[in-house]
């Protein structure tokens, strides 16, 4: 009985996930991902965090409502940082990593006078075309050292 319930829930979850992924625009290659991600970071640098999240959401491969909520939280966090640290000075591309033709991650550093934020943008390619699946930012500078 539990197996049928579990299996049914897994199928429902997969159907919902794939329906969201099917409606997103895709990015044709990693060069296009780099351009879109760089534009995203330029908007974050200029303080247009909501606009950055809104524009990049066209390439979402995940639930739009959850992503929108994450964008709102990011805007609040960046606003608080700007109030405490001043406006960001610049951003720098730190790393580009891929796992075959399946996953692609770009890591940026958003630099302030006395601190920095690490931004990671993750993409997934189910078949042809890349979709955004996650944007994360943190202050864990130690994770950058290998």
Image (spheres, grey):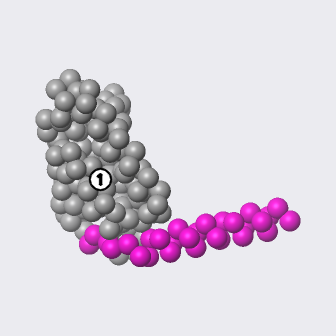
At 56% from the left edge and 70% from the top edge, which residue is drawn? 16
Answer whether residue 48 is visible to the viewer in this image.
yes
Looking at the image, residue 138 sits to the left or right of residue 1; the answer is: left
> How many other residues sit within 10 Å of disc 1, few (<14), some (14-19) or many (≥20)?
some
Residue 137 picture quarter: top left
Is 2 one of the magenta-colored residues? yes
Taking the view exactly as shown, the residue that stands out farthest to the right is 1
Q: Quadrant of residue 28?
A: bottom left
Say above or below: 136 vs 125: above
Name which residue lies at 23% across and 39% down: 109
User: Which percent across, then down, holds residue 15?
Assistant: 58, 73
Residue 87 image offset from top left, x and y in percent = 18, 34
Quickly name the residue at label 1: 50
The tally of labels here is 1
Seen from the viewer's position, the closer of residues 51 and 35 is: 51
Q: Is residue 136 left or right of residue 28?
A: right
Q: Nearer the viewer, residue 7 or 80?
A: 80
Q: For the C terminus, give its image quadrant.
A: top left
Q: Measuring 31% from the left and 60% from the top, which residue is drawn there?
A: 54
Would residue 118 be seen by someone viewing this image from the given angle? no
Q: Residue at x 72, y 67 (%)?
A: 7
Residue 14 x %, y %: 58, 69
Q: Quadrant of the N terminus?
A: bottom right
Observer-nearest of 80 and 34: 80
Residue 9, quarter of the rendered image: bottom right
**Depth order, front residue of 84/123:** 84
Expressed as whole percent of the image width and height from the top left, the position of residue 57 reads: 34, 63
The kind of secondary structure element at disc 1 is helix
Magenta stretch holds residue 58: no
- Residue range in magenta is 1-28
Q: Is the magenta region chiefly helix, strand or loop?
A: helix
């Amino acid at each position: 009985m539990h197996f049928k319930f579990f299996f049914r829930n897994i199928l429902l979850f997969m159907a919902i996930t794939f329906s969201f992924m099917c409606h997103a625009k895709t990015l044709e290659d990693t060069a296009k991902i780099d351009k879109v991600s760089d534009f995203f970071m330029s908007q974050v640098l200029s303080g247009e965090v909501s606009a950055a999240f809104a524009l990049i959401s066209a390439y979402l491969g995940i639930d739009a409502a959850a992503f929108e909520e994450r964008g709102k939280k990011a805007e609040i966090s960046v606003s608080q940082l700007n109030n405490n640290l001043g406006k960001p000075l610049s951003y720098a591309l730190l790393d580009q990593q891929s796992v075959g033709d399946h996953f692609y991650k770009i890591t940026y550093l958003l630099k302030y006078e006395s601190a920095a934020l690490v931004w990671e943008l993750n993409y997934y390619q189910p078949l042809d075309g890349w979709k955004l699946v996650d944007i994360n930012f943190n202050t864990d500078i130690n994770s950058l050292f290998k």
